[in-house]
Image (cartoon, rainbow, N blue to C red):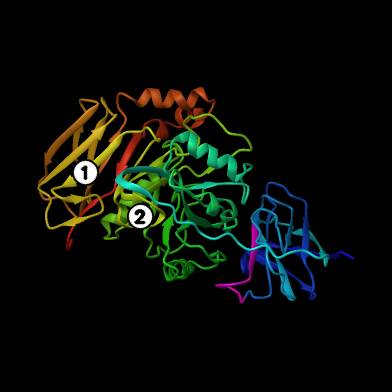
Amino acid sequence: MPMQVTARVTRADQAANPYFYVPFEVPEGTTRIDVTLDYAKSADCIIDLGAFDPRDTGYPTAEGFRGWSGGARSSYFIATDDATPGYVHGPIPAGRWTVILGLYQVPEAGAEVHVTVTLDASPRPVAPQPSRTCPVRQGDGWYRGDLHCHTFHSDAKGAPETLHAAARQAGLDFLAITDHNTITQHRYFHPHSSPDLVFVRGMEVTTAVGHANVFGVDEWIDFRMTKPSDAHVLERLVHEKGGLLSINHDKPVIPWDYEMPAADCQEVWQSTWLDRNWISLERYQQRLAGGMRLSAIGGSDFHQPADLRPEGPLVLARPTTVLFLPELSEDAILAAMKAGHGYVTESPNGPHLEIRCGNVVMGGETDEITTLDVDVRGAKGDALILVDATGPIARMDISSPDWRTNIALENPVGFVRAEIVAEASRQGLIEDLLALGLGKSAVAADPAVAEQPIRRALSNPIYLRNT
């Protein structure tokens, strides 16, 4: 017989803990669990859904996570041989399990939630989890990828196979699939990583007051942060497992409202530049000026639709992160991300932007920067801006499609980084968005947005040592 639990959640519950637990007992021999959540969903009532098994020790736990679907699903199953996307199949230990409800939006009057649990003991095999593969493509050079995207293992409609096809269509070399609060996308992406397209292990830690990407970790990372200081717990959990931590889209609508941890990267560009990415860039600049060393990366945050969409301004790899690698492999990608050996550009075919100080490359450090070598391709008619800890320090017109120059600098402070700002290309970029029926309100209705410089590429800094 199904077990049914009715509970009332209130804003007081939400304030005390945004995660609400509904326990249930699982006997020995159970091979499948089905859970359904029912409530009156509305704009001010959104409740997320997930599962933990008896190994959960409370935040932060290393074991016991069995799945998360946020507000994207109202039911799931977990079996020994299979599970709903976002949920972890495998052995089903006897004991106290919990349905976890994320109290994302709770109306003033509260909400009544109904949870139904059905258990089954039919014979089933125990399917193993996929093993990580480590493909390598030999050869150094510039490699292109997207470091933030989603499948139906969280809140997108599209299958991993469709996202894979989108990455091939975009001509990418690497892709990090960062589904929300889960790693079950590994079921597909571990066995399908190849020298043609390397998949980077990823997960987006997603809460109501901040998102962060975890890269290069096989294990799930506990996302149940409830205090500003829990950002430091997150950083410890990630670094103990040898991973990288990146702060995501630090701008409205979901800025980073936790304390600032010792992160490795910051996503300075998410989706189209006109989606308030100048705010992310300003916060990145402030952190650099304050002495932090954060590698700048970008990601589309593309939520793959059920079908494969044609190339355009708002699909996968807009923007693209470009890294210089000694070889194409996940280990080389992670090392270059941490070191800052690369830049972010508007698309897979966006402008190339490279700065050097002698033999010191982007992400490196030197005792002084008196001259800077700049290499730009694909941005004729636009402008190059150089920035140090005090702000912009130089501006030059990009006069040819393949533009190289050496710029003399006088006592830059802290670091030097570069931006390509649209001048000749500006109107065309705006029209591309308007042609999609998108961006009209952002471009035309808000004068502050309309006046914003449109960046086409952003370099990582070269740092000055001991400053």
At 78% from the left and 65% from the top, the residue drawn is 7
Label disc, if present, on residue 332 of the rendered structure = 2
Q: Position of residue 80 (x, y in %)?
A: 72, 64
Report the residue that reaches farthest toward the right. 1
* Stretch of the chain drawn in magenta: 57-68
Amino acid type shown at disc 1: Ile
Q: Observer-nearest residue: 190 or 273?
A: 190
Residue 63 magenta: yes
397 left or right of 8 in image: left
Amino acid type shown at disc 2: Ala
Tag 1 residue: 355
Q: Position of residue 52 (x, y in %)?
A: 67, 68
- Which quadrant does the C terminus fall into? bottom left
Q: Observer-nearest residue: 263 or 241?
A: 241
Please report whichever mark, 1 or 2, sits nearer to the chain's N-terminal start.
2
User: How far separated are the C-alphas under marks 1 and 2?
Assistant: 20 Å
Res. 423 in view: yes
176 left or right of 128 in image: left
- Above or below for 437 versus 411: above
Classify mark 1: residues with Cα within 10 Å, few (<14), some (14-19) or many (20+): many
Magenta region, mostly helix, strand or loop? loop
- Above or below for 184 versus 151: below
Label disc, if present, on residue 53 of the rendered structure = none
Q: Secondary structure at mark 2?
A: helix
- Which quadrant does the N terminus fall into? bottom right
